[in-house]
Structures are given as structure tokens and as C-alpha cells.
Amino acid sequence: MEPSVTPGQTVKPEGSKQPKKVLCIEDERFIGELYIRSLNKAGYDATLEVDGAKGLEMAQSNKYDIILLDLMIPNVTGIEILRILRDPAKTPNFKGKIIITTNLEQREDVRQDIEKQADGYIVKAELTPNELVEFLNNIA
Amino acid sequence: MSKNSDYLSRAKRQYYITLFLGLIGEGLVLIALWEVLRIFVHPLLSNLFIGLILGGATILISLLWANILTKRLISPVQALWQLIINIAPNGSLPPPNIDALKIGRELVADLSSQVLQLAGNAEQHETSHLSTDLSRNFIANNLPLPLFILDAQETVVFANNHAGDYIGINPKDIIGKNFYMVMDMSFPSEQTLDKWLKQVKSSNATSTTSWERVRLNVLDNHPTRLFDLAAYYNKDNPDKQETILVAFDHTKQYSQDDQAVSFVALSVHELRTPLTLLRGYIEALGDELSGNASPELQEFMLKMSATAQQLTIFVNNILNVARVDNDQLQLQLHEESWSDIVTSAVNAISLRAKVRGINIEATIAPELPSVGVDRLSIYEVINNLIDNAIKYSGEGKVIKVDAHLSNDGMVETTVEDFGLGISPSIMPNLFTKFYRDHRNRSQIGGTGLGLYLSKAIITAHGGNIWVRSKLGEGSTFGFTVQPYAKLAAEVKNSDNKEIVRGAHGWIKNHSLYRR
């Protein structure tokens, strides 16, 4: 019974020669580091950002294919970032996929926004870093 | 009936007392006459012969006289008693002959007609005593417990004042409505009020039963109610008043238990981040060590991982029970491959089994249709069932997991262990909250929440969960989930929003959230 993503295995996301760029906006540095490590090992080009404001700026640069977005982050909250990125007036031509990562129950309005505007949603406590990689492989 | 026979025996006693009093009356009159004669006639008794004749004559006359008097005086009363005993159920005396009365015939006839009228009323009352207007019944109305009476169609025919207060609706607005519309209740077990009523009605039995921890799903702005419910069904009652229900409120006590769960959930939530980290590091460590570690080190890694996983199951159970209790368990039903889900869930937990020396054998039928499930919740169900199987395996070293299509077109999965088994007496309680097999409570850990939660999750998926077990031979837990096609058809036919992403995507239709 082997785990589905074997250690050290390199997964090339289909249809692209360039590794996919992932931005992980996550203030829980340890968790962020674990995610980055697994993603990079699996062939992604992943970057960690612990500050909300800086994270938003980076995401708006439109350099990233996938944004992993924590909801509880300092300065600008995840849900604000989500709204700004999805607002064409504030972020024109945004093309990245946004995956919300959280451990919390959401208020109804927040939940609705996530459901409308995000491309995916994961509960951090439910996934190990390797399982996160597997999840992203599927969504790409 | 016991009341009637009681009245009858009392009436008979009165009748014989009247007869006896009549006899005493006769005796008294006789003695009185004898005294009169003795005092006035005594001086004349110089001659024994005359004395004897006079004495004899006096006795005869007084007997006759006394008899006539007593009969005339007592007989009207006697006649009335005779009448009463005659009309009483099982009455044994012949009806009195009122015409034979010399004194008080009019009075007796008059009284008799009144007695007959009363008896007529009583009889009417007897057969329909329940259909009297309870709304004017002081006791029923002011009973400090919510009381409902339902007719054969389960429509409320009576609700007392307290019932109205209890559910926050005017009793007058309850009457005439279907009971289940008035009281939206969640029962802690499979046996719900409607099922029970169906049973007793079909078997035409008079029966009583009760439930603990019934929850009233209240309207907005009204506090939640938790209560025990007692039900009495009497087939002999007229159709209009077949079922009587009384609620015993335990909101305070029961909600304290629930609050305890909420508090624990709040605390346990804080465990999630460190636990996530711990699992992440264990995984990373495993990656780094893979292939290079000694067998002992590898085993330690395995055990560490299994332990962290066990803790995760525990934390998730607590959090989800709190969600179920607050009606916040939300499912996002996606199209998933069932064989993938079962395989990965089994793979994940097989570590834990392996540590205990147990092997999990999974058999998945080929070409199962894709299913519509909430992946994480379903993982929890499989986890809980296998976790239980591990706990209760005893000497058993194999757990069999089998996924296949059931006869009714659902996807069924069974988890079978060959361990301790479950005693039939506790089977009905298995899926209730906090329930744990008392025999094993001290030896086997657990919160008594796993099966309760599994059931809530499966029910919310539109499936079923069941158990079959033999003491000493092992248990099989099984559950069903819906094929995706069936679910999608259900969504299309309802007012729900469309499926946003089809093909191999997920139903981004959140009105599919179920509670």
C-alpha cells in the first residue's frame, strides 16, 4: 500500500514545459514551508509569502498560475485579497487559479464569496503536504 | 370496568342493608306492641287461659301490623335500590314492580325516571368519555407538561396551554394541523414517532413508548427544545383521540451536554494547526528517510504516522459532532470515483491496522458508477468504521472491506471484522450519541461519537448505514451512497441551481448542501 505521491517523485503538470508557478500566501510559516518544500519537490515553482499586503501585490503581478490563499493573514485578509483579485477594475486580466486554504468555519457571506470566486478550497488539517500536491495536480 | 363493579357491589350492599333495616323495623314495632300490651293488659291476666289467648293474639296482630308498616315504609326505598341494581352493568335483581307499592308509588315512579335518565347519561358518557371537550377540562389544560392528542390521521385534536407555550404557537393554531407540521422533531434513533405509530396501528395494539433526547427543530426566534417524549396509543379509543403524547422537557440538562461538546470542540480546534504541522513533518521526515532508514526506524515512522492519524480522526470527530449538533454539518457533494476514495481511505488507515498486526483486505467491484459524495466526510465514515473494526478486532487479524453495487442501485460498502461482536441487546443504541459498549468501556478507548457521526453523515448523503453482528464472531458495518447520476437527476428535478461543472468536475452547486 504505497502513498499516492511517492517521495521525491517529480510530477510535470501536463501541457506545460515551464514548471507551474505557485504563490503560497500563508502566515503560519512552518506550514507554508512544508507546502513549498513538497511542491518544489514535485516539480512546481513555489514561493511563500507570510504578509497579506505583500502577497496581494505579488499575486497582482500576474506571474503565478496558482495562488494558495490562507484566510487568516496579517494586514490584508485572505477574503479581501480574493475579492480584489477577482475584481477586473482592481486586477485586470487576472488569470491565476485561486485555492483557499483554511481551518476555520466561515461566515455565510464569506462562504458564498469563496464558493463564487475561488477555484478550490481545502481544509489544511485534512491534507498533508504531499496530498496538497496531489490536489493541485488534479486541479491544473 | 373495575369502577363499575365497585359501584355495583356498593349498591348491592345498600340494598341488603335496606332489607335488613326493614327487618329490624319489624322487630322494633313488634317489641313496642308487646310492651304496650304487657303494661296495660298485665293486670287483667289473672286467668292463665285468657292471658295465653290475649298474648297469642297480641303477637299475631303485632306481627301482621309490623309487617304491613315496614313493607309500606321500606318498600319504596327497596324498589329504588332494586331498580338501580337492575340497570347496573351485570345487574342481577329483577326490576321492581312499582305498581305493587302501596305507599310512595308516585315518588318512586318519579325517582325511577330520574335514575333511568341519569343511567342513560352515564352510559353515553362511558362510551365517549374521551370525546368530551377537553379544551374545557381544567386538568388537561393546566397540566404543567405539554400534552397533545392526535386522531387517526395524526392531526392534532387537542393541545393544552402548556403545549402552546412550549413550542411558541397558540394552541388554537395547532389544532386541526398535522402533528408533524407542528412539531418538526429529530429523534435520536431510527425508531421515530411516525414509524412507531405505523407499527402499532398495523398490529392494532394498545401500546406505550417513550423517547429520550428528542429535539424540536424550532422556528426562528424560539429557543431550541430538548425533551423526552412519552406516547400512548389506544386502539380502543375513538378514532378522534387515538394517540396521546406528553413531552418532558430536559432542555437545560441536555443542552449542557451539548455545550460540553461545543466547549471541547472549541478547545480541540486549537489542536488542528499543531497536528497539521506534526503530520507534515512526519511526512517530510519519511520522505527524507525513505530507503535509507533501518527497519526499526521505519517502524517508528510508521507508528508515529499512525498515531498522528488517530489523533486527527479524534479531532475531526469532535468538531463534526459539534457541527451536527448545531445543524452546521455542510456537505459539498462532488462526483468522485468510489474505488479511488475507498482505496485511498483504506491505504491511509492501513498503517494503523498494520501497527496492531491487522491486515485490511479491500475488494472493490469493477465498474462501479461514480458517486456523489463529500470526500472528506466520507473519509471520516470509512475511517470511523475501520477504526472501530480495529478496536474491536480482539484476536481477529483481518478486516474485510467490500464495495459493490447494491440491489437498489446504491453503492454499498461493508467493513467486516472477525472480533468481539456486538450483543443484540445493545445493537439499537449503537448509533446514538455517547453510546459505548459498557462491557468494553474500560479496555477500549473511544468517545462514543464515531458511529453517531457516521450515521449523520451517511444520512445527509441520502444513504443508509446498518450493522450485522454475532457475539464472539465479529461485526459487519455497511453503508450506501448515491451514484452521481442519480444525485444529478435529483438536482435537475429540484429547484436547485444547475450543476456548474459537469464532466469530471464537481457539483459547484451549493444549494446541494445538506444538513
Image (cartoon, coloured by chain):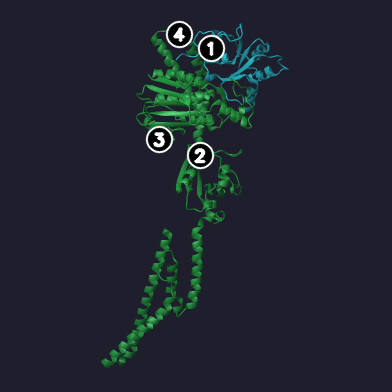
Q: How many marks?
A: 4
Which percent across, then down, holds residue B451?
46, 30
- Closer to viewer: mark 3 or mark 1: 3
Query: What distance separates the C-alpha of mark 2 from that of mark 1?
Result: 46 Å
* Disc number for residue B347: none
Mark closer to the chain start, 4 or 2: 2
Can residue A124 be seen? Answer: yes
At label 3, counting other C-alpha atoms closer than 10 Å, the crowd grade (few under 14, some 14-19, many 20 or more) is few
User: Are the residues flagged by discs 2 and 1 in contact, CB closer than 8 Å?
Assistant: no
Q: Which residue is mark 1?
A: A34
Query: What distance separates the C-alpha of mark 4 from that of mark 2?
Result: 53 Å
Q: Colour of chain A?
A: cyan
Do marks 4 and 2 share a chain? yes
Q: Colour of chain B?
A: green
Q: Residue at x 48, y 75 (%)?
A: B108
Query: What distance separates the C-alpha of mark 2 from that of mark 3?
Result: 19 Å
Which percent across, then down, holds residue B70?
40, 79
Q: Which residue is mark 3?
A: B426
Which percent across, then down, holds residue B287?
48, 9
Q: Residue at x 38, y 20 (%)?
A: B358
Amino acid type at circle 3 is Ile
Query: What distance separates the C-alpha of mark 3 from that of mark 4?
Result: 46 Å
At label 2, counting other C-alpha atoms closer than 10 Å, the crowd grade (few under 14, some 14-19, many 20 or more) is many
Name of the residue lying farthest toward the left: B48
